[in-house]
Amino acid sequence: MSSPKPNPLARLLAFLSSFGLATIVLALLLLITFLGTLEQAEYGLVASQARYFESFLVDRIDIGACWRALALNAYWDIGNATFPLPILPGGYTLMAVLFVNMFLGGIIRIRKSPKTIGVIISHFAILFMIAAGAVSYHFAVEGNMSLREGETSDEFLSFHDRVIEIEKVQADDKAKRTALVIDESKYRDLSAGKGRTFTHESLPFDLMITNWKKHAQPRRDRDGSRGDAIDGYFIQEVSMLDDSGGALADEQLASACAAIVKDKKTGAEQKGILWEFAAAPWTVTFGDDKYLISLVHRTYKLPFAIKLDKTEQEKHPGTERARRFTSWVTKLEDGREEKRVITMNEPVRSGGYAVFQQTFDDGTRSRSGVKSSGFQIVENPSDHWPLISCIIVAEGLLLHFLMMLARFIKVGPWKFSISLILAFNAAFALAMWKLL
């Protein structure tokens, strides 16, 4: 008699928990990390991270950008070749599959015994680390702050979140600044022909947003033939490539939309264009009051201020390639001053925020002649979860190997392993206490 075939659910569970699936997922993670790192040279960190690591599917692969990042264009220039089909799963999809694979294979289906307790603990810690990534993706706030030497700020701009701000001009320059904010999710679906009206009891007007474009800029309507022109300008979508055919970084692209304000009393309308790179907000006047309306990246406030005292750049010997950026700063909080040093891979952490060194300008790029530093600010509720998970992984593997050693030397595995782990942890804690 032949044995009965497993049912489809059992076969699906066996596939999802298999070593083969884990191997494929890890290989694909290695591949997208390699490609994303190469494309970062032309697209910038934000765009590459969004395309490869925060997506369900990689929408396209810029083979030309990867080719140039490897300096292979010195031997053969392939131009701006791209693979436009979304056949490669993104980091979000791969990590979700890996989480399911490890949960089923490393927690549910693994043989439960004293011999595998350390391995189970290590698998649980890795799942905890993947969960930390999911929490960071959905709930972390990331942005940047740019400071010149001697400058102080307690605000930073979001990388991704764009908003429309409506601010009433205050007669008193010292008055506290307040603004009404419309989140991008409320208007980013308003393409040509669509509009949505926003109102607030404190405003003497209603605001309609329409014709929103993600990558655009105002262009002059030279022949006056466009029906969507406002004050002689219209919104035109722009290419994501520069004049030489290279991809523009996400930070170099700007959104734009048309705005119409309508007086609540008279019904009179004023029209304008909101552009992310505009030199000044759009100003509308109602009686003696003026209002500033602008399309900007969302502003977040820090619980402390940072003053940039000095910043320096180290270069690799004999080259112009940057080796290290370092900033000497003063952290100002509740009237207290604290001198800190921020350098690459060595951030300053305080109040749930981490401040990373990101960019450096010796004054040439900004044409100011004054050195400046760009900082990446991250507020992440799972900031320390990866460290915790690494410690748990180490403890689990240590327990596993100590129990194997105990069986080899024929002593009680639990008493031997736990006592040595406690001794190691005590020694580590003492060493850290001495260092700090």
Image (cartoon, rainbow, N blue to C red):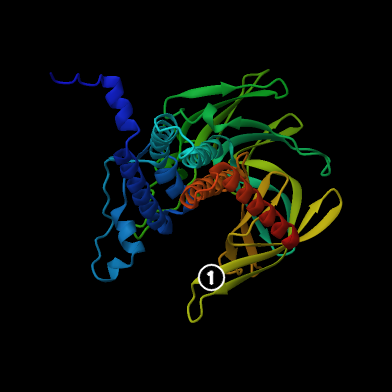
Q: Residue at x 42, y 59 (%)?
A: 41
Q: Quadrant of the C terminus?
A: bottom right
Q: Nearer the viewer, residue 4 or 215?
A: 4
Q: Which residue is mark 1?
A: 323
Whole-percent x, y for residue 394 in the image: 54, 49
Q: Residue at x 36, y 62 (%)?
A: 69
Whole-percent x, y for residue 164 in the image: 60, 35
Q: Quadrant of the N terminus?
A: top left
Q: Residue at x 30, y 23 (%)?
A: 10
Type of amino acid under label 1: Arg
As drawn, is 334 to the left or to the right of 192?
right
Furthest toward the right, the residue is 335
- Residue 366: image quadrant is bottom right
- Secondary structure at numbered mark 1: strand
Furthest toward the front, the residue is 410
Whole-percent x, y for residue 71 in the image: 33, 67
Q: Is residue 149 visible?
A: yes
Furthest toward the bottom, the residue is 318
Q: Nearer the viewer, residue 161 or 198?
A: 161
